Image (spheres, coloured by chain):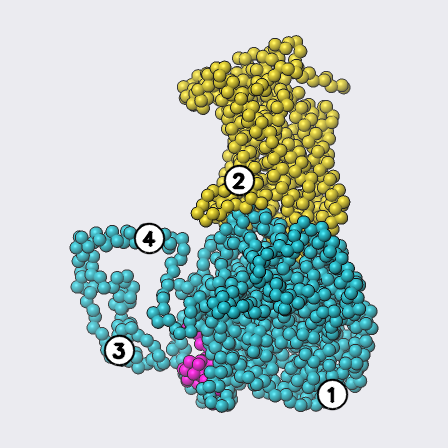
Chain colours: A yellow, B cyan
Amino acid sequence: MALQPLNDVMITGDQNNRSLDDAIASLILNQRRHQKGWWMLFLFGVLGTCLMGVSIMWLLYQGIGIWGNNVPTAWAFDIVNFVWWIGIGHAGTLISAILLLLRQQWRNSINRFAEAMTIFAVMCAGLFPLLHTGRPWVALFWLFPYPNIMALWPQFRSPLMWDVFAVSTYFTVSLLFWIIGLIPDFAVLRDKATKPITRVIFGIVSLGWRGSNQHWHRYEQAYLLLAGLSTPLVLSVHTIVSYDFASSIVPGWNVTVFPPYFVAGAVFAGFAMVLTFALPVRSFYKLKDLITDRHVDWMAKITLATGLIVAYGYMLEIFFAWYSANPYEWDMANNRRYHGPYAWAYVMLIVCNIVAPQFFWIPWCRRNVITVFIICQLVSLGMWLERFVIIPMSLTANYLPSANRMYYPTFWDFGMFLGTIGFFCTLMALFIRFLPVINIFEMKDLLYKIKTAHPTPAIEPGHEPVGSEA
Amino acid sequence: MNVNETNEKPRLDLEAIRAKLAGQTGKKYWRSLEEVAEQPEFQLWMDDEFPNRSTIMQINRRDLLKFMGASMALAGLSGCRSVFLPEDKVVPYVKQPEELVPGKALFYASSVVLAGYATGVLVEQHEGRPTLLTGNPDHPASKGALDSISQAEILNLYDPDRADNVTYLGDISTIETYDVAVRTELEKAATTGGAGLRFLTGSVTSPSLAAQIGSLLKKFPNAQWHAFEPAGRSNIYDGATLVFGKPIEPIYNFKNASVIVSLDSDFLNATETPGSLRYARDFADRRRVTGKTGVMNRLYSYESGPGLVGAVADHRYAVKASEVYNVALALASGLGLSVPAATVSGPAGKDLDAVVKDLQANKGQVLVIAGKHQPAEVHALVFAINEVLGSFGQTVTLVEPIDVTADSTKVKSLKSLVDDLKSNKVEQLFIVETNPGYTAPVDLDIATAIPKARFKVRFGQYEDETSKLCDWHIPQTNLLEEWGDARSFDGTVSFVQPLIAPLYSGLSTLEFFGRLQGKSLGGYDLLRAYWKQTGLGGDFEKSWRQVVHDGIIAGSEAKSVTAKVTLPVFPAPKAGSGLEINFRPDPTIFDGRFANNGWLQELPKPLTKVTWDNVVHISTKTAAKLGIDIDDTVRIEYKGRSVEAMAFHTPGHPDEAITIHFGYGRKEGGNVATVSGQDGGGFNAYLLQTSDAPFIGTGATLTKVSTNTADIASTQGHSPLQADHVFDDRDIIHDWTLAEFTTKIDDILKEEGEKSKEIKENNLYPEQIFQFDGAQWGMTIDLNTCIGCNACVTACQAENNIPVVGKMQVARHREMHWIRIDRYYSGTDENPAVTWQPVACVQCEKAPCEPVCPVAATVHSHEGLNQMVYNRCVGTRYCSNNCPYKVRRFNYFNFSDNQPNYSEQVEASFVGNANIPGPIHIQHKQGIPLLKMLNNPDVTVRGRGIMEKCTYCVQRINEARVESKKTNSPLKDGDIVTACQQACPTQTIVFGNIADRESQVSKLRNDPRAYLLLEELQTRPRTSHLAKLRNPNPEIKSFPAFSKGGES
């Protein structure tokens, strides 16, 4: 059976401004729309957050020793989780900034969602570099260049120092981007609100937005500036995270391909995670007209494309290990993939990250939400395994064979990981319930453009979306 | 409250006080008559916080408010500190002693006694606290080095588990009560001449103690002295009796030995033989090669278990312990002695002719030595072989036994004591130091025998298994708290002097025996009186001061005796059947007496690198035959008894045999000694040992109980990651045979030069990194002389306040030792060659750890040290990841405060494998945080979450630099000695200024054998390693493969 080609309609059904308001704003204004599905997510999230809380308390009380880290494997789940979360946080800014600059209109229905995910993922990620230090109570401020009478500064040569700046900048800019984008929608919610309390709250956070020309002008200027600012950040954050490894002398880490390969991997994981949340939300809240199958299709394609870049990275890793003629690198390459005790992790990673996304070549698989969802789960797992393969496994085998030691995680390693997943779900649940999950005014703008361009549903080049002028 | 009532002082009962004072002996201070009278009011007065205040009602309102205000303010101040930290009490000197400068360590000569034999030490003392034991360079048994067990004595001193009270039937009693009881008993014993009086001691070499026991025995002519050492040397004396007719002690001189044959002797190990440090030194001196040429001795080792000697041997043969007799017979008959013929199977037999030829060719420079566990016949043969090879007077000196208990006609065995006990002949039993309740062979059934004595006293440092069998336990002082003497391996009299007042109430051995004679004198008086009587030559006062200062009586070594071997009739060798079982003392905790010592428990055992446990050593082939894998729990059945143990494949172990070590499975004797299960503790090998075949038995069976259930914590290998061998393509170990090295040295140098040149050409860094015109520190480690004895590991631990982490943490690979001795096998699993490679921080000039630290906690000094700033460290552990040598250690928990806690780790069942130390607390005893007193005040104690590593003992460098600046005299080579270097018996480690072309370290760094570990990484280490050389017999082809065999 041949599949019907999808038309490029980015909003389906008979929509007008009111129906858009109803579809999106009512998620906040009509709390009855949140049913069992939301409560399940929230409950899972809260339980996970509790686990995270307990894990952190126990960690602060006892020390890093509750984890399985050792010498030589001084970094393990802590940094695996950090890199994984940071990677997930990548899709948001990519969608909101790069796709904005590339004038990809289809981003409008998922950018809010993706940005929220970015912020929450970076929050989860940010926990790890701080908590994985032996003395987080001093690491909290010694890692920042604050003036002090001892004239002691951080060491700017250290990639960890670069991390601090990269991640904190990324978080700040993403947060600003997200909040600024929310202001017009807050105004809509204020205007639509029936309950006084809701009106007051959204009245305050909408910062007196009246939708005047001047407001829109300022808004678009700011939005574009921030988009320009975040674009390099998308590339820089994970590049810098990869420097933690690439600039070291650890066999298996010291690979020049890491920066592009990490960025691609991050986008890969990020899109998988956006789909992981977008698919259930769109089905629970009947938003299929706004996040259409075409959107899913586009995202699956990006996942496939980035997945291929990642696969290329894997090949290069092996190639460099061989081409360098460095016995340590070559032993590491073999140890990881072939005779090492964790070789199963590498096989699983290849299955998840390279084999699974190939199904996206088949259009049916891209449009079937079940296959998309399953493949996205595999990709998330695969990307986690990728970091596991890179980080602890490179450390278990060393230059001096006498230092070779196995690494085994403990309950608390998994506790922290599951805990942050719960924390992330809690934040996502609260976001879905109390903030507009889809950008209302951009959808209206899009609808207007679609309608004015009728009957052609596609956006002609030259019809600029909001904020792309300047 | 009735003021008058509380303030009324009851009348003192002066009569009672007089009576009390009259009953006292010796010096005893009392503060007031009330104290003497022990009135309850005095106790109240003592307990009262403000004894001289009136009641609160007598204070007027204004004063009360003043007090309240003041106390509030003070409460605030005290809150700053005592909430978080223990309260410190500082008592300044009112009159400072003349020789004492606070912050400056003092050193005193003393001795550490192991199984009777003394090794001279210098004790470092900080403000009255002994903190470190180092070898006494003037002492013949030490020459400045010190083994791990002797160094760890300092931890025993501060052990909170040491017995601190006189107990009677488990209840606290007093020494006075004991004195009364003893007096009554001895009066009773005197009526029969002491027929029921028995003393049981370990080996005794102390002249003063021997004299004391002798005079006791004179007083009680029917009394009997028994001696028992679980890993004793009686076989040697028995062997000597076979050939000489009387016990004779051989002392070896490795300096003169060009060819050495070890018949299952581990003469480099302190648990094997007294004088091992000296032997190691002399042995290594004959292997030292400098420059392009050199001469080395040759060592053949026939070995029945994992040992240090086999690891350094040029030819090692794995031979069952029972077959060593065959080897000895074959050697003897090969040398023309008329002994029964014997065949030796395997490679050992094949090469025997070549060995005999080598021995004959080197007559007069040959040394044959047998292990103390080998039967008397082997020792007899060894005496005969040494005589025929002309070794007597050259490499072997014969002396009268140093050990007073060696003569079995005078000092009876444990077995005869048990026989007497069982036939109810023993009335009074005094057990001194030795712990037969744990160490006696199981067939003696000591637990039912000892209680048969009517009056039984145990004198020892710990309330252990034996104490539980006795009525009285009298605490013994530590060596560092008492006066005493002992003789070293060559007979030199060595003195023990106290460095600190006894931490607990206790008696020294001299004082204990003194009291039995009614002399309640102090140890000093007893010792002095003995030597005054014996005489020290010349003016006694002067000589006394001299010997106490030196720690030895110079020239007091035993006089050699001439003895002639008369060959007895040797029994024909028996073919052993069944699985052979070998009992050996543990290489770290000896016979179990050091089981409560965390340093020794955590010290990786040589070769196996196992910590905290003993295991069943078994060869891979035999294990495969029995279907046993490493980490399986197995049951050893032997003579109808069985124990469960953990199996461990030991490469090079002979087939059809197992080796088990004593010392574990303790039931009493301290928190650390009695750990069990996941915390270590092993199994009790004494439960299988029988008195008829104490060290070698046959007929054991080994069955698997469960698969992979044992959890052995080992610091190297024992993982799927192949940590035992150097991969072929890695250039980590440099080794050659001596012949190869001397003939091809120029080619080797050329090749290495080209390699270094290539590395230098590919270098982005400038050739000279440091532009500092001062000292540049460096170190060399000679793989050729390293014997893998671990002395440096313990020295580093003691010097640098390195914590003990416990078995669970070692299993998690979090041991904290700053220096480790890597052990690489090469060749076959059946009989591999071993290479030791000590690795500590190599102080890279371009240290990869430095640029990655985000807070600059690890930085370079202008003298080339890679320094760790503990206070600045936040614990990202990036430096450890980026260290190619993996020498950095991280405090994953608050290890330093958990020192006494290593056994108290809580196993939360739901946590799976994660193990968490129990609540953090400092173990106090009598209000003193004892283990903290052990800390070296010159070295920071690291807390949780901090990275640490070797600093080249920077505290010693700094102290020497300060001294040199103060005296305005430049530092000389050898002024600074690192702790590892100081302890090393073979002078493998050399430290110094590499900028000084004339320093020893500079010369060694430029030696043809010197190489930089992982030079290709451009880290530019300041520590160089020197290649290992082996000296195989060219006639022997079955030469174990090397890691870089044949390469030139």
Q: CA distance from mark 4 to mark 2?
A: 36 Å
Q: CA distance from mark 1 to mark 3?
A: 73 Å
Given the image, what chain letter belongs to the residue carrying mark 4? B
> Residue A12, percent across and down?
62, 15
Residue occupying image coordinates x 63% and y 61%: B1023
Query: Mark 2 vs mark 1: same chain?
Result: no
Query: Mark 4 vs mark 2: same chain?
Result: no
Q: Which residue is mark 2?
A: A127
Query: Pointer 2 and pointer 3: residues touching (CB < 8 Å)?
Result: no
Where is A200 relative to B738, above or below?
A: above
* Nearest-to-viewer mark from 2 and 3: 2
Query: Mark 4 vs mark 3: same chain?
Result: yes
Residue B16's tag is 3
Q: Which residue is mark 4?
A: B77
The secondary structure making up most of the magenta span is helix
Q: Is residue B508 magenta?
A: yes
| In the displayed structure image, the side of residue A395 where residue B10 appears, left or right | left
**Segment colored magenta:** B505-534
Q: CA distance from mark 2 to mark 3?
A: 73 Å
* Nearest-to-viewer mark from 1 and 3: 1
**Identity of the amino acid at label 1?**
Leu
Q: Earlier in the sequence, mark 1 or mark 3?
A: 3
**Identity of the amino acid at label 4?**
Leu
**Identity of the amino acid at label 2?**
Leu
